[in-house]
């Protein structure tokens, strides 16, 4: 494939994806005239019209649609090949964009990032703590850390590597229990103050044989998990929290799990990425390191009782 042919293909794809010659020129940092020249050159070489265009809109002709779909596959394969070659390098480097739930902003997680940095100093980890489910492709992320009850809730076509079970339990502060007592059954929760998370309006227990739902007496509500453990620690009320937060140094002597025989949600932490093929070293190194770090930490906790 000649260089000018490849350039023409890239320009044509950008025009279609951008929706106009002007937008494509802006993204390619080229003039509109140059973009138009490349597309006309492709049409002349093929002997067909690829685009119907006027001063305001453009659309694909039938040959244009076929050519667009085939060229998209060709360029995707070329990108995969380049990623494969890049992954053969001996030193992981670059910027790794990661998204994870807001409650991952913890001492333990940042300690893991510090150790990862020590081992891979040429990788810059760019982390976004957010509770929304992002689109890895559209939002430009390399990796997502997600906690969910099952793979069916994850987007199709992505790779999900399990890291660790993360059960959710009912959390209280020692001060709250001293003041109000601890619930002895799920039904008792209807008489206790609750800190709601998102649209939560009831306590739901997923037992091995049955599902139990108890109305929640909401006294305060948070739209993300980030502030919930602090509100529980302040003695405002009870809330569902992941087991990992009870293990955080800031909460270890403050938060207490109640109704331990009645877990709320049996969830698992997964690392989500786009493809098993040609995984760049920066992604592969983070995944392998995180799995290793969590396994070592769990073994240490088990050994310490």
Image (cartoon, grey):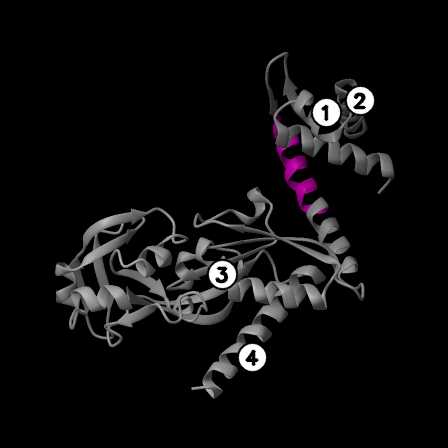
Q: The magenta stretch spans which residues?
A: 60-74
Query: Where residue 234 appears, x then y in whole percent?
Result: 31, 57
From what the image shows, is residue 73 above or below residue 175?
A: above
Give how far apart the Cα atoms at labels 3 and 2 are.
50 Å
Q: In front of the other: label 3 or label 4? A: 3
Q: Residue at x 21, y 51 (%)?
A: 218
What residue is pinned by disc 1? 25
What residue is pinned by disc 2? 34
Q: Residue at x 31, y 66 (%)?
A: 265
Give how far apart the Cα atoms at labels 4 and 2 are.
57 Å
Badge 1 marks a residue whose secondary structure is helix
Q: Earlier in the sequence, mark 3 or mark 2?
A: 2
Q: Earlier in the sequence, mark 4 or mark 2?
A: 2
Q: How would you rate the neighbour count of disc 3 (Cα within 10 Å): few for under 14, some for 14-19, many for 20 or more?
A: some
The stretch drawn in magenta includes residue 73? yes
Q: In front of the other: label 4 or label 2? A: 4
Q: Residue at x 44, y 47 (%)?
A: 132
Q: Earlier in the sequence, mark 2 or mark 1?
A: 1
From what the image shows, is residue 160 above or below residue 72?
A: below
Give how far apart the Cα atoms at labels 2 and 1 are.
8 Å
Report the front residue among 263 and 104: 104
What residue is pinned by disc 3? 106
Query: Where residue 244 appears, x then y in whole percent?
Result: 42, 68
From what the image shows, is residue 206 above or below residue 215?
A: below
Q: Earlier in the sequence, mark 3 or mark 1?
A: 1
Query: Where residue 108 appears, x then y in whole percent?
Result: 52, 67
Say the numbered circle drawn on residue 296. 4
Q: How would you rate the neighbour count of disc 1 (Cα within 10 Å): few for under 14, some for 14-19, many for 20 or more?
A: many
């Amino acid at each position: 494939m000649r260089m000018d042919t490849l350039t023409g293909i890239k320009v044509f794809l950008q025009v279609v994806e951008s929706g106009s010659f002007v937008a494509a020129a802006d993204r390619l940092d080229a003039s509109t005239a140059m973009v138009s020249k490349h597309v006309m050159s492709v049409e002349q070489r093929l002997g067909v019209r690829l685009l119907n265009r006027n001063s305001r809109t453009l659309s694909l002709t039938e040959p244009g649609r076929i050519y667009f779909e085939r060229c998209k596959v060709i360029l995707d394969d070329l990108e995969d090949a380049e990623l494969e070659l890049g992954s053969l390098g001996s030193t992981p480097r670059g910027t790794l964009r990661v998204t994870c739930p807001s409650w991952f902003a913890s001492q333990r997680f940042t300690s893991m990032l510090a150790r990862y940095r020590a081992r891979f100093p040429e990788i810059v980890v760019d982390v976004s703590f957010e509770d929304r489910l992002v689109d890895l492709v559209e939002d430009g992320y390399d990796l997502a850390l997600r906690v969910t009850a099952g793979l069916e809730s994850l987007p199709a076509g992505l790779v999900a590597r399990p890291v660790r079970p993360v059960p959710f339990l009912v959390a209280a502060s020692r001060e709250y229990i001293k003041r109000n007592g601890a619930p002895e059954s799920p039904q008792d929760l209807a008489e206790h103050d609750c800190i709601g998370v998102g649209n939560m309006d009831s306590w739901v227990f997923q037992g091995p044989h049955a599902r139990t739902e108890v109305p929640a007496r909401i006294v305060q509500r948070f739209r993300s998990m980030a502030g919930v453990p602090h509100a529980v620690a302040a003695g405002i009320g009870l809330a569902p929290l992941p087991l990992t937060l009870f293990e955080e140094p800031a909460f270890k002597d403050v938060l207490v799990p109640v109704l331990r025989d009645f877990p709320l949600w049996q969830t698992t932490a997964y690392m989500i990425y786009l493809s098993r093929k040609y995984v760049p070293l920066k992604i592969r190194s983070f995944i392998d390191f995180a799995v290793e770090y969590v396994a070592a930490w769990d073994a240490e906790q088990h050994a310490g009782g």
